[in-house]
Image (cartoon, grey):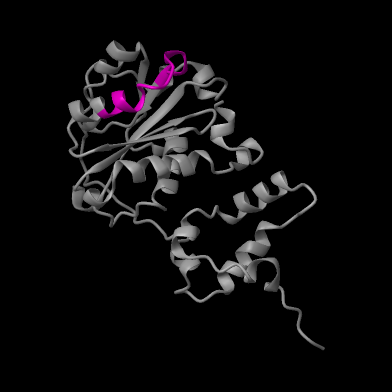
Amino acid sequence: MKKRKVFQRPLAKHRLSPPSCLELQIPTTHAGSVSYAHLKQQISHQTIYKYLWSLDRNYPIRKVMRRSGRRNRKQKPGFIRKQATDRVSIHDRPKVASNRKRVGDWELDLVVCKKSTGYLVTAVDRKTGYTLVGRCQKKLSRLVMDTIRSMFKKVPKEYIKTMTFDNGTEFFYHPFLFTWFKVMVFFADPYCSGQRRTNENTNGLLRQYYPKGVDYGSISWQQVRKAAMLLNLRPRKRHGYQTPASLSQ
């Protein structure tokens, strides 16, 4: 009895180059977006996973798979991080922002490039997942605030209601944001990245395009815009496989 070739169709015939792989969603998202766009065609994400794991470890798609493990970083005992002045806790944030009931509640963070040669500033709307990405050469609070200002200059002010940060020193000049946008600013609890999980997840997606070993000098403004565009055109499971771009129109 002949063995059935499970992966011959429809996946085995698609040989993606590394740039194409970067634009491929995770199997669950890809399967869902196919079902959403072509209702008569169904494909299981388990089938995609099985196909990927059947490939050689050095195959291009395997090399750019998102999950590669994380190091467990621990602070030294007794370490106390300095906190921003006029800091308002995330626990005082309006419930409508915490419940994702409206557009305009943003989470922001800093993504570090190779050997701190530069930084990418990310901002994600909690409800739609719409993402803004900016470049900042140094981890200085005033420079980071200026980068955030330029990122939001084309966003209507009615869609800038709250911003939530971690406790990094790069966000200490947050009062400028209220002056520019009249926005309420909140800070998560120390070492509680799960309170900003929307932003943390988006940073993980961005790392597909710019891994930790990438030098800041090799990232152009055009590349940053393209990465943000691809993230906003990426179907999301929690939105029924609609894209953040379509939800923000």
Quadrant (top left, top right, bottom left, bottom right) of the N terminus: bottom right
Q: Position of residue 78 (x, y in %)?
A: 20, 40
Q: Is residue 161 magenta?
A: yes
Q: Position of residue 194 (x, y in %)?
A: 44, 38
Q: In this rendering, is residue 111 above or below 176? A: below
Q: Is residue 37 left or right of residue 80?
A: right
**Number of numbered callouts drawn:** 0
Depth check: 219 or 167 in front? 219
* Quadrant of the rendered image containing residue 6: bottom right
Can see residue 140? Answer: yes
Q: Quadrant of the C terminus?
A: top right
Q: Is residue 66 visible?
A: no
Is 89 above or below relative to 20? Answer: above
Within the magenta stretch, is there residue 30? Answer: no
From the viewer's perspective, tell me whether residue 223 is left or right of residue 37.
left
Outermost residue, right direction? 1
The percent coordinates of residue 66 (x first, y second) are 46, 56
Q: Nearer the viewer, residue 55 or 218?
A: 218
**Residue for point 46% across, 37% down:** 197
In the image, what residue occupies the spot 67% across and 64% down? 47
Q: Which image quadrant is residue 161 in?
A: top left
Q: Which residue: 44% across, 41% down? A: 202
Residue appearing at x 62%, y 36% in the figure: 239
Left or right of 98? Residue 213 is left
Using the image, determine if residue 220 lies above or below residue 196. below
Magenta stretch: give its range: 147-162
Judge left or right: residue 178 versus residue 156: left
Q: Tell which residue pokes out farthest to the front in this image.
A: 222
List x then y, in percent, for residue 140: 17, 32
